[in-house]
C-alpha cells in the first residue's frame, strides 16, 4: 500500500505526514499516481483538501481520504462526489485514527468518525443517553459500548480488544443490534443511533 499526502498548506501536510510516520506508515513521493494509492488530501476545508489533490487519477481517485479542519454537509457531499472513501476532522486525526482510516480506505471501506457523521447528518451531535427521544429502542450497556466504538470507526478486532471479549461476541452483538434497530449495515446502525440520540 502506498500513501500519498497532498495539501496546499505545507505545515498541515507535514503534520499529517508526521502522524502517519508515528503510526508506522511512510508517505510516498510518487510522481505518478496509481489507483492502488491511498491519497490523503489535507485542507482547512473539504473543498481546499480536494482542490489540493487535483489532478488525480483519471476518472477519480477511488481511495481518497479527506482530512479537514471544518466539515460541513455540503463539503462532505463534495468529497463523496470526488470519490472520498473516508473523512476525518483534523482535531480527531490522531496517528492511530489516521492509520486505521488509511487502511480502511485502502480496502475500499468508508469511514467517518462519530463527530463527522453527526455534523453530516444535521450539523450538530445528537443528545445522548437520557435525552434520547421517546420510542427509541432500549439497548444493553454492551450494545451501546459496541455502537459507540463502531461510531468511532473501530473494527471488530479493536472493539473486542477494547471490551475484552472475543470477535465472535462482537459479531453477535452487532447482529443483535442491527436486528433491534432494523438497519442494513454498520454505517446505517451508527447513523440511526446518532439520529435517535442513542449515542
Image (tube, rainbow, N blue to C red):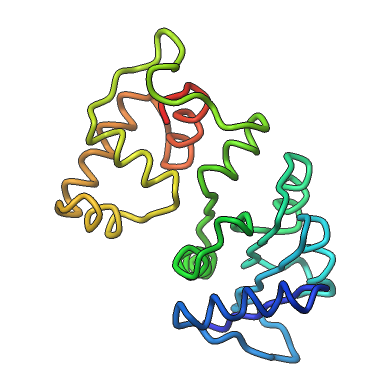
Q: Quadrant of residue 5?
A: bottom right
Residue positioned 67% across, 32% down in the render:
123
Q: Quadrant of residue 178?
A: top left
Q: Nearer the viewer, residue 2 or 71?
A: 71
Q: Where in the figure is residue 150, as x and y percent of width and height?
A: 39, 46
Q: Where in the figure is residue 98, as x and y percent of width and height?
A: 52, 67
Tell me: 3 left or right of 48: left
Residue positioned 65% across, 71% down in the render:
40
Q: Where in the figure is residue 17, as x and y percent of width and height?
A: 61, 79
> Is 147 drawn above or below residue 19 in the view shown?
above
Residue positioned 52% across, 53% down in the render:
111
> Is 44 drawn above or below residue 132 in the view shown?
below
Tell me: 178 left or right of 187: left
Residue positioned 35% across, 56% down in the render:
155
Q: Where in the figure is residue 172, as x and y percent of width and height?
A: 20, 41
Q: Nearer the viewer, residue 175 or 116?
A: 116
> Is 174 drawn above or below residue 138 in the view shown?
below
> Is 82 drawn above or below residue 25 in the view shown?
above
- Screen quadrant of the C terminus: top left
Please tell me how many numbered marks the rendered image carries.
Answer: 0
Amino acid at each position: 500500500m502506498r500513501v500519498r499526502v497532498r495539501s496546499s498548506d505545507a505545515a498541515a501536510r507535514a503534520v499529517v505526514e508526521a502522524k502517519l510516520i508515528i503510526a508506522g506508515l511512510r508517505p510516498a513521493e510518487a510522481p505518478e499516481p496509481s489507483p492502488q494509492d491511498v491519497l490523503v488530501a489535507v485542507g482547512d476545508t473539504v473543498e481546499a483538501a480536494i482542490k489540493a489533490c487535483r489532478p488525480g487519477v483519471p476518472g477519480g481517485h477511488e481511495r481518497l481520504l479527506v482530512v479537514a479542519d471544518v466539515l460541513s454537509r455540503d463539503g462532505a457531499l463534495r468529497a463523496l462526489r470526488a470519490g472520498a472513501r473516508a473523512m476525518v476532522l483534523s482535531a480527531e486525526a490522531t496517528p492511530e485514527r489516521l492509520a486505521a482510516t488509511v487502511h480502511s480506505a485502502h480496502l475500499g471501506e468508508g469511514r467517518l468518525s462519530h463527530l463527522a457523521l453527526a455534523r453530516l447528518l444535521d450539523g450538530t451531535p445528537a443528545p445522548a443517553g437520557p435525552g434520547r427521544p421517546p420510542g427509541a429502542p432500549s439497548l444493553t450497556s454492551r450494545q451501546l459500548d459496541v455502537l459507540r466504538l463502531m461510531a468511532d470507526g473501530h473494527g471488530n478486532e479493536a472493539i473486542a480488544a477494547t471490551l475484552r471479549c472475543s470477535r465472535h461476541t462482537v459479531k453477535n452483538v452487532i447482529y443483535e443490534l442491527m436486528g433491534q434497530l432494523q438497519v442494513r449495515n454498520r454505517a446505517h446502525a451508527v447513523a440511526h443511533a446518532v439520529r435517535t440520540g442513542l449515542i
